[in-house]
Image: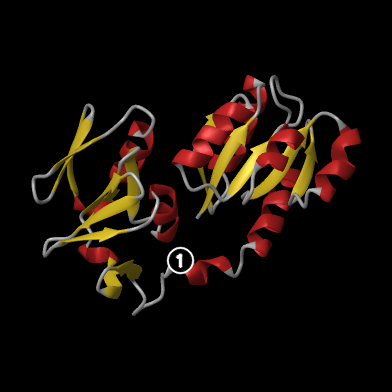
C-alpha cells in the first residue's frame, strides 16, 4: 500500500486528488495539507511514500520545500504552471501533473511511482518466515515477531516494545521504527504510541483498549486513521 500526502493550498485541488486516490487500488490517503509547514509536520508524524505537491503555495513554494528534505518520499508535482517542469525533473520527481489533469493522467503518474517502488515490498517483511522485527538490544540482535507486539511506547530516543512475555528497550526514533513496521498491521495513535491493530478491542473518545486491558491514548491528529484501521 502506497501511503499518500496531499500538499496543496487550493481546496478544490485537494478534493480532486483525494477522490482520485480513494478510487485507485494500492493507494491510501494519510493526510492533507495546505502549505509546506503543515507537510513537514505530517512527514515527521507519519511514514509517507508519495507526496502530491503543489508548487505555488504561500510561505514556502513546493520546489523550495522539496529541496529542504534530506530523504524525501516519491513526489508528483501538481501545478498550473508549466514553466516549472524542468526544475521538477532536475529534482528527480516521479512526474509532473499540469492542472487540470484527468484521472487517466493521474493514474499514469501513479503507475510510474509503483514501478519505481517495485523492489520495496521485500523490505517490508511480508513473506512467510520473515514476519518479524529485527532490533538491537543490549544483549545483541533480536527478532520480535510482529504477532507478539502489543504496543510500542516512545521515550525520547528510546522505544519500549511491549509483548505478552516481556518488554524490549531499543535505541530508535519513533519515525524510524514506524517505517520498519508493516502499515497494514500497526497504527500510530499518538506522538508516543504505536499499536498492533489486531490487539485493539475497544476504541473510545481519546483512547483505545487493547486485548490485555491496557489503555492507550489516541490524539486528535491520529483519531481518523485509528478509526479507519479499526473498522477496516
The image position of residue 79, as x and y in percent, is 78, 32
**Which of these two is toward me, 45 or 169?**
169
Which quadrant holds residue 148? bottom left
Residue drawn 53% across the image and 54% down it: 26
Where is residue 222? Give x, y as percent.
36, 34
Residue 232 seen anywhere in this rendered image of the structure? no
Q: Is residue 82 above or below residue 75?
A: above
What is the secondary structure assignment of the residue under circle 1? helix
**With 108 as the anchor, is 129 left or right in this view?**
left
How did the renderer colour the structure? Answer: secondary structure
- The structure residue drawn at horizontal position 81% and vertical position 44%, both measured from the top left corner, is 88
Identify the residue shown where x is 91% and y is 34%.
83
Residue 98 location, x and y as percent? 81, 36
> How many numbered badges does the structure rendering display?
1
Q: Nearer the viewer, residue 136 or 186?
A: 136
Left or right of 55? Residue 133 is left
Q: Residue furthest left?
A: 213
Quadrant assignment, res 125:
bottom left
Relative depth, front residue between 34 and 17:
34
Q: Which residue is mark 1?
A: 124
Q: Residues within 10 Å of mark 1 (few under 14, many from 20)?
A: some
Residue at the image position 83 percent from the left and 49 percent from the top: 89
Q: Position of residue 22 (x, y in %)?
A: 53, 41
Q: From the viewer's perspective, is residue 37 above or below residue 121?
A: above
Q: Is residue 135 visible?
A: yes
Quarter occupied by residue 185: bottom left
- Name the outermost residue toward the front: 138
Amino acid at each position: 500500500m502506497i501511503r499518500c500526502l496531499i500538499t496543496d493550498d487550493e481546496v478544490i485541488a485537494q478534493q480532486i486528488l483525494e477522490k482520485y486516490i480513494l478510487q485507485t487500488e494500492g493507494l491510501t490517503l494519510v493526510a492533507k495539507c495546505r502549505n509546506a509547514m503543515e507537510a513537514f509536520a505530517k512527514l515527521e508524524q507519519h511514514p509517507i511514500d508519495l507526496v502530491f505537491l503543489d508548487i505555488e503555495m504561500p510561505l514556502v513554494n513546493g520546489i523550495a520545500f522539496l529541496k529542504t528534505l534530506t530523504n524525501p518520499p516519491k513526489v508528483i508535482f501538481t501545478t498550473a504552471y508549466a514553466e516549472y517542469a524542468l526544475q521538477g525533473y532536475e529534482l528527480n520527481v516521479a512526474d509532473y501533473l499540469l492542472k487540470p489533469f484527468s484521472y487517466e493522467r493521474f493514474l499514469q503518474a501513479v503507475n510510474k511511482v509503483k514501478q519505481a517502488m517495485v523492489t520495496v515490498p521485500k523490505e517490508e517483511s511480508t513473506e512467510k518466515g520473515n514476519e518479524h522485527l529485527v532490533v538491537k538490544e543490549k544483549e545483541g540482535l533480536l527478532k520480535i515477531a510482529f504477532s507478539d507486539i502489543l504496543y510500542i511506547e516512545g521515550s525520547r530516543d528510546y522505544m519500549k516494545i511491549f509483548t505478552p512475555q516481556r518488554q524490549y528497550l531499543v535505541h530508535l526514533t519513533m519515525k524510524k521504527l514506524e517505517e520498519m513496521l508493516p502499515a497494514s498491521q500497526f497504527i500510530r495513535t499518538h506522538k508516543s504510541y504505536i499499536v498492533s491493530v489486531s490487539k485493539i478491542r475497544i476504541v473510545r473518545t481519546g483512547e483505545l483498549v487493547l486485548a490485555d486491558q491496557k489503555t492507550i491514548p489516541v490524539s486528535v491528529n491520529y483519531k481518523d486513521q485509528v478509526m479507519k484501521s479499526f473498522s477496516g
